[in-house]
Image (cartoon, rainbow, N blue to C red):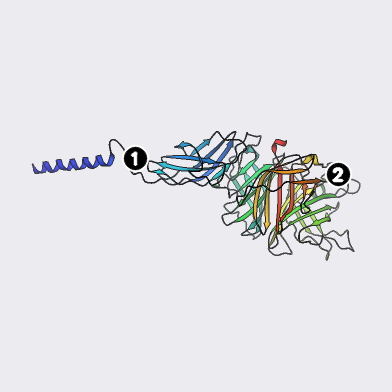
Amino acid sequence: MKGTWRLFISFLLIGSLCLSFWGCGGSVARYNPGPSGTPTDLVVIETGDGNVTLGWSEAFNAAAYNVYYSTSPGVTKFTGTKFGTTTATNAIVTGLENDTQYYFVVTAVNSSGESGVSNEVSATPAVPGPIAQTDLTGIWRFNILVSGTTSGWMRGTLTVDDAGAVTINPFSDNAGGTTAPDYLFPTLRVNPTGQVRDALSVDDTLFKGVLGGFQRKLIVGTLTTEAGSHLFIILQKHDPAVTFSASGDIAGFGKDAGGSRGFSYSQISSGSLEEWEFAVGQIGQKAPYEVQYSDFINPSGTQMPGSDPLSPDTKVSSMSISSSGVVTEARGTSDGIPAPTAYIAEGYMSDDKSLIVGVDTDSVSPGKYVMRIYGMVNIIAYDANSFSLSDLAGSYSIESLIVGTTTMTASGILSADGATGAVAFDSYQDSTGNTTPPDGFTLAITSDGILSSVADATLHGKMAYNKDVVVCTKTETAGVYSLSVALKSYLEE
């Protein structure tokens, strides 16, 4: 009998414990699930007409997720607008205004409460345009100038597959490296308005750029590493079926067919000497296709190459090109005459034969690294192509590298008036978070597409042959220099 009572009492105790543990039909999680983890790896999957699609990694112990957004950075649970709650690890945020930049965060929730916010991402919804992911698929050759905590250059070739996955081969840098860093283009995605992003990035510090030009074969962008280095990046799409030759694509045409092949170049440097450089020159008709300069400007006042008063027509460098479009610049035949301090040992000519982009190490200033962009003035014999202010008219996406006493990158949208040459920023953001746009300015243009500013003698540039790209250098303030590349909007097609 005693054993029976002991068994009965045990059942009562167990029942009492169960009731206190579970409650009236409730669950353990309802009362003590423990805090949920914070969502990570928030990314913008795509933007659309009034909406933005987000994705993120699953958080530990999360029952659901809240999505918050704002038109100002630094979104919190208290300053942001709560869009809604979802049990999925993705959401389409609707009801947004097109062409307005939004900032997003996500939190995890369960019956114990709400987690902290995820990393913040930004995106701008827009009416879909004609640009598609297939525009990225293929082979791209890239040049990168590195400034900031470390300086140098990188170049190589990458292939983008239909899903946006990237393979880089070959790769080289100023230190002799042949393996690209992990943060460089693990994947690339483009939205309908031409914004190109590394879709695996967890914040705005990694690659962001714009696909532009009417042929959609040029990407200009920036990347800030965790270590604080700023990368200015230019990618040129290349079709292996396009071939090149020195006589057809580098050499001048001779006096009986239009004269020399003219060009200008815009350059920015990082490292031991940080400044811009702008030059105008021409290439001769016969091998070794020697270069002669007629204008050469930089803040440090370097003597113009070949400017020997006893030999004013001296050629101081020469150019050659491979059948795949790799351009090589070399020392000319005139020893003792001032020459360029940097030669581009491996630059890439665009498939339309109008641009050459290259990076290299300066041969005179140790630790000085340069990015140089050549714009061709004439690319065929008796070339009738010419420029006027009306060619500037339109909207542009602009990417800039700023070096010197201040080092950063910047991007924005600007508009140019084709009647007056007046240029104004519609939006702007730099890598410090500043969104106050620079002052507007007014441009003048020659028939060769050479650009200058009516009020700023430090601004020099060139409109590309196809009138869809503008490259400029200038002094921002004392000791601060910039290189900017502006791509005309696809809406101007």
Compared across the picture, whether 140 is left or right of 247 comes to left
Residue 350 position in % (x across, y down): 73, 46
- The residue indicated by pointer 1 is 30
Q: Amino acid at mark 1?
A: Arg
Residue 156 position in % (x across, y down): 66, 52
Q: Amino acid at mark 2?
A: Ala
Q: Earlier in the sequence, mark 1 or mark 2?
A: 1
Compared across the picture, whether 439 is left or right of 105 comes to right
Residue 473 position in % (x across, y down): 74, 52
Q: Residue at x 65, y 34 (%)?
A: 129
Furthest residue to the left? 1
Compared across the picture, whether 359 is left or right of 81 comes to right
Residue 374 position in % (x across, y down): 76, 50
Q: CA distance from mark 1 to mark 2?
A: 80 Å
Q: Nearer the viewer, residue 422 or 301?
A: 422
**Mark 2 secondary-structure assignment:** loop
Residue 288 seen by the camera: no
Q: Residue at x 57, y 51 (%)?
A: 183
**Mark 1 secondary-structure assignment:** helix
Question: From the image, which quarter does the N terminus lie in?
Answer: top left
Compared across the picture, whether 125 is left or right of 282 comes to left
Residue 349 seen by the camera: yes
- The residue indicated by pointer 2 is 381
Checking the image for residue 118, the label placed there is none
Q: Is residue 304 above or below residue 184?
A: below
Q: Residue at x 85, y 41 (%)?
A: 384
Residue 300 falls in which quadrant of the image?
Answer: bottom right
Single out the mark in the foreground, 1 or 2: 1
Q: Nearer the viewer, residue 26 or 258?
A: 26
Question: From the image, which quarter does the C terminus lie in?
Answer: top right
Q: How many C-alpha atoms fall within 10 Å of the one at disc 2: few (<14), some, or many (≥20)?
A: some
